[in-house]
Image (tube, helix red, strand yellow):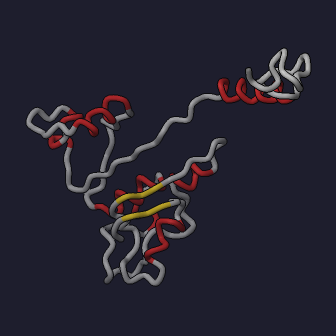
Amino acid sequence: AREGAPGVPGHVPGRGAVGHHPRRRVILLAWLARRAAAPPVPDVVLLILDAVGVDKVAAWGAPDAPRPPTLAALAARGVAFRHAWALPSCSPARAALLTGRHGRRMGIGEWMQTSTNTWGLPEAERTLPERLREAPIPYASALAGKWHLSARDEPAAAAAPRRHGFDHHRGSF
């Protein structure tokens, strides 16, 4: 027999195996009810593919395109932007996607290179990961791959993704 069960020395009537205090049971039940009532927080996965048109992606109906199963599953369950404009080079496209503003409005009109006079995405620009961090249920964010919103010779290039809201970054600049 387990300790605390009827017929066992030390048993106290009204106190079962769930907890010794009825108040703890109420708190546990309230916590479980609140967790069950909370709406699920959706994951946000944003894929940026350089130099890939919709005619090269099976999820957009390209008949001869490769069909990677993970990408196909993400496209089937997610939101696909089918009526959107893209910018012709990577840095302004990334800047626009992360900030919601046209790249030229923040001084990023072409791909970032070491010979430009600008050092990249201005600190004052609010990015998607910064806004998601301020959500009622904050999001964690990570960037895997090319940042390309600051020049490599910027004194603090390695910290640029984190300064703009990403919690983690693995990739090139």
For residue 78, above or below residue 44: above
The residue under the point 88% across, 28% down is 21
Q: Nearer the viewer, residue 8 or 104?
A: 8
Which quarter of the image is occupied by the C terminus?
bottom left
For residue 115, above or below residue 172: below
The residue under the point 35% across, 65% down is 171
Which quarter of the image is occupied by the N terminus?
top right
Q: Nearer the viewer, residue 80 or 103?
A: 80
Q: Is residue 145 left or right of residue 121?
A: left
The residue under the point 31% across, 29% down is 76
Q: Is residue 82 left or right of residue 31?
A: left
Q: Residue furthest left?
A: 64
Q: Quadrant of residue 93?
A: bottom left
For residue 20, above or below residue 157: above
Question: How many numbered marks are there?
Answer: 0
Q: In x, y percent, where is residue 155? A: 46, 84
Q: In x, y percent, where is residue 82? A: 30, 35
Q: Is residue 148 left or right of residue 140?
A: left
Q: In x, y percent, where is residue 29? A: 76, 24
For residue 120, above or below residue 85: below
Q: In x, y percent, where is residue 63? A: 11, 32
